[in-house]
Amino acid sequence: MDLTSHKIPNWLTLSFIPLALLFHAYFGQGFPFALTGLVYAFIVLFPFFIFRFMAGGDIKLGLAIATFVGWQVFLESLLYGLMLGLPLVLVLAWRRVGWQGFKTTFTRYGVILGTRRYLAPVPGEMAGLRVPYGPALALGAALAVVLNKYQIFTLVS
């Protein structure tokens, strides 16, 4: 849904948080495990929302992921999501604005660095695009869970 409508429904993300808390309280690693993941994700992700690096739906998806997988795997999933998201962002931006949009954005960044003055993005440039990040976060979470489950690779032990 995020790819087509730029929306991640609240019923989808917010319903998973209490489900994860209940699951871990009765069957999983305990209520504190899930609650710690939720609190840690909020602390990490809320600044991304404040500074408008990520939208609210992406933040709520991250909270749901962290409540299910815990703070350590969440940290890895966020890192993998950022790594997987960069190519996604570049491909989607290229499809929407082409070479000229990239060129305009990087030229504007050069002027900003040279003059130390902010210049707002203009229509048709890469910096003005809204890019869905939910799929990258979901893929990052899946990758982190699989890599940790089968002990293939882990960043946080």
Image (spheres, rainbow, N blue to C red):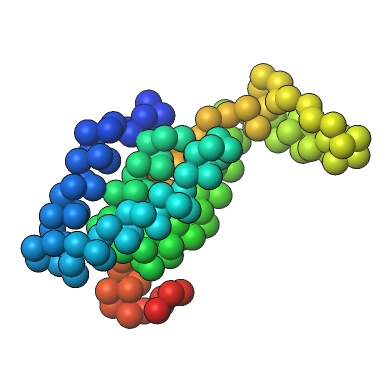
Q: Position of residue 60 (x, y in %)?
A: 35, 41
**Across the whole image, how many numbered discs are drawn on residues?**
0
In the image, 117: left or right of 123?
right
> Where is 43 relative to 11, above or below?
below
Residue 75 can be seen in this image: yes
Image quarter of the C terminus = bottom left
- Residue sitting farthest toward the top: 123
Q: Position of residue 36 (x, y in %)?
A: 32, 61
Drawn side of residue 59 relative to residue 30, left or right: right
Q: Judge by depth and name the residue closer to the eye, 83 or 50.
A: 50
Q: Quadrant of the N terminus?
A: top left
Query: In this rendering, is residue 87 above or below 71?
Result: above
Question: Does residue 143 appear anywhere in the picture?
Answer: no
Q: Residue at x 29, y 49 (%)?
A: 64
Q: Position of residue 13 (x, y in %)?
A: 27, 41
The picture quadrant where one finds residue 144 is bottom left
- Vertical side of 127 occupied by 21: above or below: below
Q: In the displayed structure, would residue 78 be above or below residue 105?
A: below
Q: Residue at x 34, y 44 (%)?
A: 61
Lateral position of residue 47 relative to residue 67, left or right: right
Residue 89: quarter of image: top right
Q: Nearer the viewer, residue 35 or 111?
A: 35
Q: In this rendering, would 88 be left or right of 105?
A: left
Residue 108, image x, y percentages: 80, 32
| Residue drawn at x 25%, y 39% as measured from the top left | 14
Of 122 and 28, nearer the camera is: 28
Residue drawn at 37 percent across, 49 percent down: 62
- Please identify the residue farthest to the left as the structure is shown: 26
